[in-house]
Amino acid sequence: MIKYILFQIQYLFSQVKFNRKREATKRLKESFGKIKEDSFDFENIKSYFRKKENTKAYQILSDKTCNDLDFDELFMLLDRTNSKVGQQYLYNHLRTIQLDEEQTKQNEALLTEFSENEAFRISIQKKIEKLKNKDSYYISTLFQEAHIRPPKWFFMVKLLSFTSILSLLLCFFNTAFFLLLLGVFCVNIVIHYWNKNNLVAYVSSIPQLLKMNAVASHLFVYPLLKKINPDLPQSMKVINEVKNRMFFFQLEAKLQGEFETIAWFFFEIFKTLFLLEPLLLFGVLKRLDTKREAIENVFRFVGHIDMLVSIASLRKGLDTYCLPNISNDNTIVANEIRHPLLFDCIPNDITITDKSILLTGSNMSGKTTFIRTVGLNIITGLTINTCFAKSMRFPLLKLFSAIRISDDLMNDKSYYFQEVLTIKQMLDESVNGTKNLFLLDELFKGTNTVERIAAGKSVLSALAKNNNTILVSTHDIELTDLLVNEYELYHFSETVEDKTVGFDYKLKEGKLKNRNAIKILEINEYPKEVVHEAIQISKEWDQIYLKNK
């Protein structure tokens, strides 16, 4: 009878486990190719990137450029990772531009396998999902941050622990030693709870490190994944060398959820009596301090695989995408290029050869969006080998932008002064000997018309030299005549009919000929005298401009 009951219990547990696996498989199948429905903790997502040594990268995208191009929103679209490790790794990968043709070929082979072999992909995802807990964000601190050092009086901890053990043994021979044990225990309580603040920082990260090492071990079984880092077993072995000591932290983490249980109470007394927490904590940290490279190797292995699954999911959900053609010349050619964050985006074609691009058009017509479109596609092309276009070709570029500029009130800097500093950095970069792409929107908006046009012309002429490519928008029609020999002219336009304004968001060759700003005032029922005076002044200024031209 007892055997039958045990069999039934075992059967029920196996059924529950089977149902969970089946539900996980169904969930992963249905979510593949779809945008992640999740909150984004950018402070933790960015932490690995902020502390990563990326000096060998071709370019690290600046916070300014990321802000200009709505990078966080782009990341939320691209991120389909299954773990916090993969999420941090993907963010860092998108911010650091570096071209490795062999790595790209290897990535594409794995992306093909993830896309075509559903069972293989899901088995990988199930393993990586074990690191989806937010505590996994803190694994990177184990190899990026300085560890807590023991105080100078730490030798007393070892002495008190030894005294506790000795007193406990001698109690069996002489009960007087119990008083000594009690006294030492009282001192140990103070030290034990002093160490709690030190322990808090590692109760999350160390158990997750062990879990990550186990996940990596399971992933490394697959021959295709071994190619990512054939030497990974050495790193996993190094971490396993301190596994037994770190097991204590796993137990601590599990018991935290059962604070009021008897098991926790006795375990706490046991740890306090022999000062196990400080002894094990500082012992483990000393060993981990010498194993930073091994931990990061495992972190990067797991993160890279998760990133590739994420890219495969992204491509699955796109109606149109292409692999970029990275050329050696200075030509940018895009066919049906789209802004990745606009789902009903109107596609456009663009070819940039010897001359850069000067865009004109009214507000909301699509100028700035198009500039961002090109910038974002080059970023995704160089980082995840994916462009939101039918086809795209461009060289290896460094990308800089001046689109969103605001006052720096904390440092007493006006809008214009901030813009001056930003453009100065671009001028410095324009002569660095590399191919650069500069994205600009309305130069020197913070100053008067005459000086804005004069300064804008001279700056744009200077930037256009030395194999640099510029995409710039302007409302100043005068610049189109001043830069006609150095820039190709394009424009976006709108139609004004009755009391409506319509935009087609199509890029057109040549400069904008029709101006509708005053007409838009009229259809929005501005006073007639205001509209009439504006028209008269506009005509007079046009005549003066034509006469001086």
Image (cartoon, grey):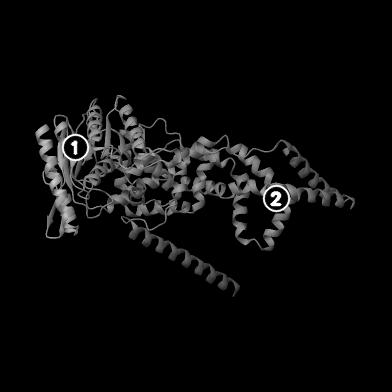
Crowding near the residue tagged with mark 1, few <14, some 14–19, many ≥20 C-alpha atoms within 10 Å: many
Identify the residue at image location x=49%, y=53%: 134
Query: In this orientation, does residue 308 appear?
Result: yes
- In which quadrant is the N terminus drawn? bottom right
Instruction: Tell me the element at label 1.
Output: strand
Identify the residue at image location x=78%, y=40%: 159
- Locate residue 444, reporting x and y percent: 28, 37
Query: In this orientation, does residue 520 appear?
Result: no
- Locate residue 132, reporting x and y percent: 46, 53
The label nearer to you, 1 versus 2, is: 1
Crowding near the residue tagged with mark 2, few <14, some 14–19, many ≥20 C-alpha atoms within 10 Å: some
Q: Nearer the viewer, residue 404 or 238?
A: 404
The residue at which mark 2 appears reads as: 193
Residue 527: which quarter of the image?
bottom left
Q: Amino acid at mark 1?
A: Leu
Kindly identify which numbered label has been placed on residue 199. Answer: none
Identify the residue at image location x=79%, y=47%: 164
Kindly identify which numbered label has been placed on residue 358. Answer: 1
Residue farthest to the bottom, as pictured: 1
Residue 24: which quarter of the image?
bottom left
- In which quadrant is the C terminus drawn? top left
| Mark 1 → mark 2, Cα distance in angstroms | 66 Å
Q: Is 482 situated left or right of 184 in this image?
A: left
- Locate residue 356, reporting x and y percent: 19, 33
Residue 6: which quarter of the image?
bottom right
Instruction: Tell me the element at label 2.
Output: helix
Q: Is 277 situated left or right of 210 in this image?
A: right
- Locate residue 487, reporting x and y percent: 17, 33
